[in-house]
Image (cartoon, helix red, strand yellow):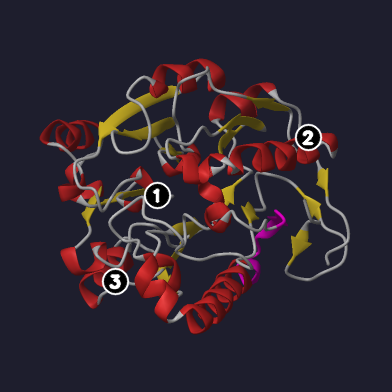
């Protein structure tokens, strides 16, 4: 675990209600080395490995730089040889109210990440930035915030299941965090994690890819989200993983945004900030996948917790 970074450098005093805080992992060892989703083509990557590795580092640095410029603070997990997808920190855990529920990966290729992330979160706990670190029951797969996306407006977790995470996961998450969970079955293998197809926005809208879900999943979204708050992602944007966005206030950090989608977002008061991430799209990931929000606080926790300050170390 590296030190807390702040846009201005030096020491930072953090309050979770005012400073977005993210977990990221530098892409020193990122590559498309195996195939566990339709985006991944190791042979194509190998033909351009040197150039693509360099591009991925530049793209990641641009994403980090833009998040810092928006006032975010960033914790860094050390990269590890042989764990190319460790860079997708959204899959590390579910985090809310300073509680961490560690991920359990379906595919053996990613299971080596589990203990590394456990050590990272225990280091955060030792620094007083996390209150508890919990594991899932044996045999239950849930791939972190990739399939467990917090909706602050509705005070619930939207939870994807099917390709990677189990349908039995939502009750476990509800028990650990004491909040409502809503399961959505994923139907398109390109959108293998929920975060590739659904993004709750700060004003209450939901950005989503309708075709990523079963008819029942779409019906559930329609039942809980008013029509004027549903923003459907056009197919061309969906193919660029535009729904895999990071909201920082009214700014949406996105890998792509067509004029059609930009107009929809601007009409609702959002400012899309496009950070191209094509190297990571080769692995099926983008902006949200490359970050894990650590400072989310539910309404119930705000009522019962005293104000706490979180003090980081000197930025590296």
Q: Is residue 34 above or below residue 127?
A: below
Q: Nearer the viewer, residue 57 or 13?
A: 57
x%, y% of residue 64? 61, 68
Residue 61 falls left or right of residue 37:
right
Q: Which span is picked out in magenta?
A: 68-78
Residue at left offset 82%, top offset 36%: 128
Residue at left offset 25%, top offset 67%: 237
Residue beneath label 2, please? 125
Other-residue count near label 1 (Cα within 10 Å), few / some / many at <14 / 14–19 / ≥20: some
x%, y% of residue 176? 55, 19
Q: Nearer the viewer, mark 3 or mark 2?
A: 2
Other-residue count near label 2 (Cα within 10 Å), few / some / many at <14 / 14–19 / ≥20: some
x%, y% of residue 314? 88, 61
Q: Nearer the viewer, residue 299 or 76?
A: 76
x%, y% of residue 181? 39, 25
Secondary structure of residue under mark 3: helix
Other-residue count near label 3 (Cα within 10 Å), few / some / many at <14 / 14–19 / ≥20: some
Secondary structure of residue under mark 1: loop
Residue beneath label 1, please? 203
Residue beneath label 3, please? 262
Residue at left offset 57%, top offset 76%: 62
Q: Nearer the viewer, residue 298 or 191?
A: 191
Q: Is residue 16 visible?
A: yes
Please identify the quarter of the rendering in which residue 11 is found.
Answer: bottom right
């Amino acid at each position: 675990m590296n030190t807390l970074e702040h846009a201005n450098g030096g020491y930072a005093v953090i309050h979770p209600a005012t400073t977005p805080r993210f977990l990221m992992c530098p892409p020193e060892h990122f590559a498309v080395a195996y195939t566990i989703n339709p985006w991944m083509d190791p042979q194509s990557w190998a033909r351009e490995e040197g150039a693509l590795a360099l591009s991925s580092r530049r793209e990641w640095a641009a994403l980090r730089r833009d998040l810092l410029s928006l006032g975010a603070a960033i914790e860094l997990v050390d990269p590890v040889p042989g764990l190319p997808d460790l860079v997708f920190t959204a899959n590390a855990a579910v985090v809310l109210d300073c509680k961490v529920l560690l991920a359990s990966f379906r595919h053996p290729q990613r299971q080596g990440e589990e203990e590394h992330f456990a050590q990272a979160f225990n280091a955060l706990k030792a620094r007083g930035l996390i209150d508890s670190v919990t594991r899932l029951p044996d045999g239950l797969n849930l791939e972190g915030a990739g399939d467990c996306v917090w909706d602050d407006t509705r005070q619930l977790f939207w939870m994807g299941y099917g390709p990677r995470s189990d349908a039995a996961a939502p009750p476990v998450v509800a028990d650990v965090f004491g909040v409502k969970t809503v399961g959505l079955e994923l139907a398109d293998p390109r959108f293998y994690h929920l975060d590739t197809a659904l993004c709750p926005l700060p004003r209450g809208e939901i950005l989503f890819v309708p075709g990523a879900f079963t008819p029942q999943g779409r019906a559930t979204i329609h039942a809980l989200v008013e029509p004027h708050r549903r923003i459907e992602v056009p197919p061309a944007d969906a193919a660029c993983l535009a729904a895999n966005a990071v909201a920082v206030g009214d700014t949406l950090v996105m890998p792509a945004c067509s004029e059609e989608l930009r107009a929809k977002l601007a009409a609702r008061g959002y400012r899309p900030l496009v950070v191209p991430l094509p190297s990571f799209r080769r692995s099926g990931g983008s902006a949200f996948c490359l970050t894990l929000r650590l400072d989310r606080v539910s309404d119930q926790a705000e009522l019962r917790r005293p104000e706490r300050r979180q003090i980081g170390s000197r930025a590296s």
